[in-house]
Amino acid sequence: MNTKFIFISGGVASSLGKGIIASSLAKLLQARGLRVTIQKFDPYINIDPGTLNPYEHGECYVTEDGAETDLDLGHYERFLGVHTSQANNVTTGRIYHTVITREREGAYLGKTVQIVPHITDEIKRRMLLLGQTGDYDVILTEIGGTVGDMESQPFVEAVRQLQWELPEEDCMTIHLTLIPYLHAAQELKTKPTQHSVQMLQKAGVKPDVIVCRTEHPLSEDLRRKIALFCNVRPGHVIQSIDAWSIYQVPLNMHEEHLDELAVRKLQIENFNEPNLGRWKEFLQRLAHPSHEVQITLVGKYVELQDAYKSIQEAFVHAGAAYECKVHVKTLQSEHINADNVAELLSGADGILVAPGFGERGLEGKIHAVRYAREKGIPFLGICLGMQMCVVEFARNVLGWKDAVSTEVNTQTKHPVIDMMEDQKKTTIKGGTMRLGAYACQLEAGSLVASLYGTTEISERHRHRYEFNSKYLEDFTKAGLKASGRNPQTGLVEVVELPGHPFFIGVQFHPEYKSTPENPHPLFKGLVKAALDNKK
């Protein structure tokens, strides 16, 4: 069987959930026994989102191979349970960078370099790249932005050309639109969808299926009307009604026969009905919790929920494992000080201090760590959160009042967190941090080893600063144990506080590897400790 390609575009408005629709369809095809992956093509000029402020673009997701990618790749991995890579996220900036570099090398033999064919050829090459590995039966490609955006036009043109170049049975296009509900008229309006599809068709792309995001069910009359005016077959207009959880969407899409439409259009023979047993078990636990806890997430970017998307989802997974509803209360670390920390954290059954960069809000994170340590509140610190728990311990237990990270003060006498040696000569910011999966050796008998059930793990990283190992003996004597270290470099990856109900700091990002069917052990541990603390 040839590799099949499904292209998913969006119109009318952004943030309709193309990533969730792509992930849901991919999950259904995977559940039918097909080998599936998803890739995201983003229209912004940045090479990758690694240098973007989380307020601009939400969370930066990191893959096993160290690619800094769009947060949608987190959805892809959580739904499919398989790793993505550098090849799964391509931006306009990366496309132009490749083409311009090749032009400077003389690769185009003196020809005038143009959007068509040179830019579109590079887009097509990358769209087809994963299909050449032989690892996948179906590749879904999500086109970022909305149809009609100036910056999205080269991607739409590339899809148009591929519709023409690929065998008809190897290519499918899906267009996601909005059907708004006008409360004054008490009716759903199809005109925005008609205009969006017309704009797509003017660009030469004919959608095979239209998925309509809606707050209210679509009647058969409305579906036929959309099909008629948008030139798609009857039955190929389906609804994506607001769901109580994003993890319910695959089941909704199956009820709408989206996966059946796909296998028939792509002429995939001998396909099975999707096996979603474990997925449904997860949803059952998620929908009917027996317990609830409150975890306070202390962070710098809490005004935008997508800034901590993977952490939020990891709590969903871990909570379902214990049939527990996890209420995540976000708290801006800038607002925390010594006088109000007890009041702001009073209702917390557990505390997570989140990742981040820069000086803003660090003192608030340190106050939150101290409160968790002294009050016996279950605590997990991630990346910068781990670094701040080291700073807090140095200041308030070891008595080094000037202890801090050199990210904040290079002149401190106690640089307990310091820049990694291989980072000190780096001047380029994008893609130069310690990125991707690295091995970690856990200390036998430690709390973290008991949570993982092993002493050898691999986790993903995104940082420039590290625990300063020259102070390790001081911390160990005072009671803060380095229970996880990189076996090659000795880098301290995990610290924990024996005698505390649950106090762990990790330099890596465990949230990136949590999925509904395999919740991350650290998040499960924190939720379980929070449940015990509440009791």
Image: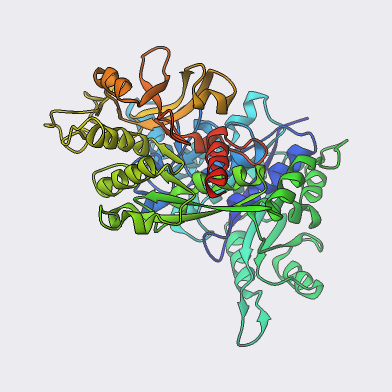
Residue at the image position 45 percent from the left and 42 percent from the top: 91
The residue lying toward the viewer, choosing from 328 and 174, is 328
Question: Is 311 positioned to the left or the right of 491 in the image?
Answer: right
Q: State whether residue 507 is above or below residue 528.
A: above
Task: List x then y, in percent, for residue 453.
Answer: 60, 23
Question: Is 404 positioned to the left or the right of 327 in the image?
Answer: left
Residue at the image position 74 percent from the left and 71 percent from the top: 218
Q: Is residue 58 visible?
A: no
Q: Quadrant of residue 189?
A: bottom right
Q: Residue furthest top?
A: 488
Q: State whether residue 80 is above or below residue 17.
A: above
Q: Residue furthest bottom?
A: 184
Q: Quadrant of residue 494?
A: top left
Q: State whether residue 441 is above or below residue 526.
A: above
Q: How is the image coloured?
A: rainbow
Task: List x then y, in percent, for residue 239.
Answer: 72, 63
Task: List x then y, in percent, for residue 492.
Answer: 36, 22
Residue at the image position 27 percent from the left and 35 percent from the top: 391
Q: State whether residue 255 is above or below residue 447.
A: below
Task: List x then y, in percent, for residue 102.
Answer: 38, 29
Q: Quadrant of residue 332?
A: bottom left
Total numbered labels: 0
The residue lying toward the viewer, choosing from 138 and 454, is 454
Residue at the image position 18 percent from the left and 32 percent from the top: 400
Q: Is residue 521 visible?
A: yes
Q: Residue furthest right?
A: 270
